[in-house]
């Protein structure tokens, strides 16, 4: 099954911000820009972009190196951005609190963004728009859940982490990110969430975002307690299933 999204075009570019580098994802390819040894400079980033002939029109900078906090829109106060993060996250140095308003969901996603990365990408791509991973995915997940009687749990697996979203109809009930280095750690946190919210397999539908060989053990382990779990795929398949976040290589929100 496919998760509703628009088709990426050759003019679409998603830049995913990981803890150890950036992934540049287009319709047909992806390139990783690592910075384990030294931070990127404007010169080095421009050289990288020119070498790979990246000349997009629609550029999205997707932060996924830290969790986010969702605040109901009616309760949201622009002056409290830092305080929203303090309640759930340890704000790091050189970060600034940013927001993405999701009017259709009545939610505001608040997240820490690296000020250096903001300035760097604005210099190279002046029209870039920044999002958090949650804001990138939530509208499509809500749309998919709308009108369904049972709860829907969505799981996004990526390198050393996974993101979990729980919906009732189109309403977001729970979202969180958890560390994981193997299928056993993943199953531990999955059982933890089910226990905390009294979820039995027959009470909810479970969907993985995409289906990729490196996570086969995760899928098989989950099916032992939830035999009817399914996979939701983007319109285009992943270019590289070993990518740090393979689903996001080809997902483009409507």
Image (tube, rainbow, N blue to C red):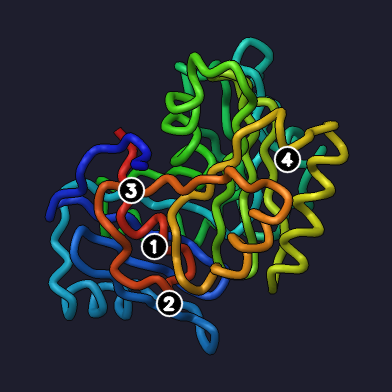
219 vs 179, left or right, is left
Label placed on residue 85: 4
Q: How far apart are marks 1 and 3 (CA)?
A: 29 Å
Q: Report, in whole angstroms, how far the alpha carbon at label 4 lies from the one at label 1.
A: 23 Å
- Quadrant for the C terminus, please: top left
Q: Which of 170 and 177 is in front in this view?
A: 170
Earlier in the chain: of badge 2 and badge 3, it is 2
Q: Residues within 10 Å of mark 4 (few under 14, many from 20)?
A: many
Residue pointed to by mark 2: 40
Disc 2 or disc 4, which is closer to the eye? 4
Report if the CB atoms under discs 2 and 4 are less than 8 Å apart.
no
Q: State which quarter of the image contains the N terminus.
A: top left
Residue at 55 percent across and 68 percent down: it is 215
- Depth-wise, is mark 2 or mark 3 nearer the camera? 3
Q: Crowdedness of circle 1 by 10 Å Cα count: few (<14), some, many (20+)? A: some
Where 243 falls versus 156 (above or below)? below
On the image, numbered disc 1 is attached to which residue?
A: 120
Q: Distance between the residues labelled 2 and 3?
A: 30 Å
Q: Please state the horizontal and vertical placement of residue 198, each as a whole percent of the image.
A: 85, 32
Q: Which of marks 4 and 3 is in front?
A: 3
Residue in the image at 45% along x and 43% along y: 131
Which corner quadrant of the image does residue 158 belong to? bottom right
In the image, taking residue 186 as reference, residue 19 lies left or right, namely: left
Earlier sequence position, callout 4 versus callout 1 = 4
Marks 3 and 4: in contact by CB < 8 Å?
Answer: no
Furthest residue in direction top, as rendered? 74
Q: Kindly identify which residue carries mark 3.
A: 234
Nearest the eye: 173 or 70: 173
Residue 179: x percent and y percent? 72, 63
Secondary structure, mark 3, is loop
């Amino acid at each position: 099954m496919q998760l509703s999204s628009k088709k990426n075009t050759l003019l679409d570019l998603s830049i995913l911000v990981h803890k150890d580098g950036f992934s540049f994802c287009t319709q047909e390819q992806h390139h990783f820009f690592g910075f384990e040894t030294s931070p990127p400079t404007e010169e080095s980033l421009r050289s990288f972009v020119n070498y790979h002939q990246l000349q997009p029109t629609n550029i999205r900078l997707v932060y996924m190196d830290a969790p986010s906090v969702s605040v109901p829109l009616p309760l949201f106060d622009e002056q409290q951005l830092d305080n929203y993060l303090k309640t759930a996250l340890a704000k790091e140095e050189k970060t600034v609190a940013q927001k993405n308003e999701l009017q259709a969901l009545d939610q505001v996603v608040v997240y820490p963004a690296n000020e250096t990365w903001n300035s760097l990408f604005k210099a190279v791509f002046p029209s870039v728009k920044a999002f958090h991973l949650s804001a990138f995915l939530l509208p499509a997940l809500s749309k998919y859940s709308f009108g369904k009687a049972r709860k829907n749990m969505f799981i996004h697996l990526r390198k050393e982490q996974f993101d979990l979203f729980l919906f009732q109809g189109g309403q977001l009930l729970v979202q969180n990110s958890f560390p994981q280095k193997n299928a056993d750690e993943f199953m531990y946190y999955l059982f933890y969430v089910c226990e905390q919210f009294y979820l039995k397999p027959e009470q909810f539908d479970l969907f993985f975002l995409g289906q990729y060989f490196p996570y086969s053990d995760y899928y098989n382990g989950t099916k032992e307690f939830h035999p009817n779990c399914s996979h939701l795929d983007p319109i285009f398949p992943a270019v590289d299933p070993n990518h740090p976040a393979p689903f996001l290589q080809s997902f483009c929100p409507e």
